[in-house]
Structure formats: structure tokens, C-alpha cells
Amino acid sequence: MTVRSILDEKGYDVQTISPGSTLREAVEVLAEKRIGAIVVTDADKRVVGILSERDAVRVIGRDGPGRLNDPVSAVMTSKVVTADGNETVHQVMEHMTGGRFRHLPVVQGGKLIGIISIGDVVKHRLAEMERESVAMREYIMST
């Protein structure tokens, strides 16, 4: 199973924000959309960063609510690990677990096409394991 199969099931919609937007604007989108991360893109839809709930909580907790007026570019993670649609579920699980992050933008041809979360990956993997289990039971019962 590939990243593309996850996106085909969950959809390609992804929330983005520009680097010049304020942290307050980003937090409002996170709260309104009930999402854990927002991808920071330039005008050409290239990924330039990602801002997670954890990033926002960390900076506000450390420096106070005055940071809500800072640009997203001052708070975001700028070294973003991305995936392409052809990577396997196993590969992205290793990236996410090893890097200790929960959201992975998906890029094709240098442009953002979607995002997957660790929850999406686990859900997809559990469904795959269930299909394998059913197939094995059916095979055993037929012999």
C-alpha cells in the first residue's frame, strides 16, 4: 500500500497558510478545522514549512501570548520531511516514528498535493492487516 492509496481514501484537501500570516491566524485555522498541523506554502504551492499544534503551544508557553502576532515563518518548522505518493505505508511509518512527527505533507513535482497524519497511516495499516487476516482464515477454511 502506498501514500497515494491513503490520499485516495481520505482526500487530497489540505489546509495551507502563507509564511507571512500571523501565528494567531494559523492557530485560528487549526482550531476551526480541528486539525493538528497546517502546511506553510509559497505562492507556487511549494512547501516552505509546517506548523503543528505542538509548535504553537511550545512558543506561546515559553514566550507568552505576544508571540501570536509573530509571522508563521518565525515559528514554523522549516526543514520539512515530505513524502511522495509512491512511498509505501511502511516507509512513511518509519519516517514519522524516527522523526517523531505526526504529519507528513505529500508532494508531487515539487508541489503540495496532500497531507497524511500518523492516524491516517495507522488506520490504513490496521485495515490492511484485517484484510490479510480474513484472507488467511478463508484460505485455511477452504483446505
Image (cartoon, rainbow, N blue to C red):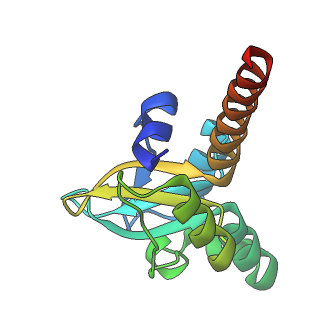
Q: Number of labelled discs? A: 0
Residue 34 visible within the image: yes
Q: Residue furthest front?
A: 143
Q: For this view, does 61 lie left or right of residue 122? A: right
Q: Seen in the image, is 17 located left or right of residue 142?
A: left
Residue 140: where, in percent of width, then height?
78, 25
Q: Nearer the viewer, residue 21 or 82?
A: 82
| Image point (53%, 64%), residue name | 91
Quadrant location, the C terminus: top right
Q: Residue at x 47, y 50 (%)?
A: 115
| Position of 99 relative to 126 (above/below) | below
Quarter-of-image position of residue 63: bottom right
The residue that appears at 64% across and 36% down in the rendered structure is 128
Residue at image position (67%, 28%) is 131
Q: In the image, residue 11 lies at what x, y percent?
A: 45, 32
Vertical order, 135 against 93 (above or below): above
Percent position of residue 109, x then y: 19, 59
Please say if 127 is above or below 25: above
From the top left corner, tell me how far across and down residue 139 is, in percent: 70, 23
Instruction: Using the rendered image of the protein, determine whether residue 23 is visible from the camera's viewpoint.
Output: no
Q: Quadrant of residue 18?
A: bottom left
10 above or below 73?
A: above
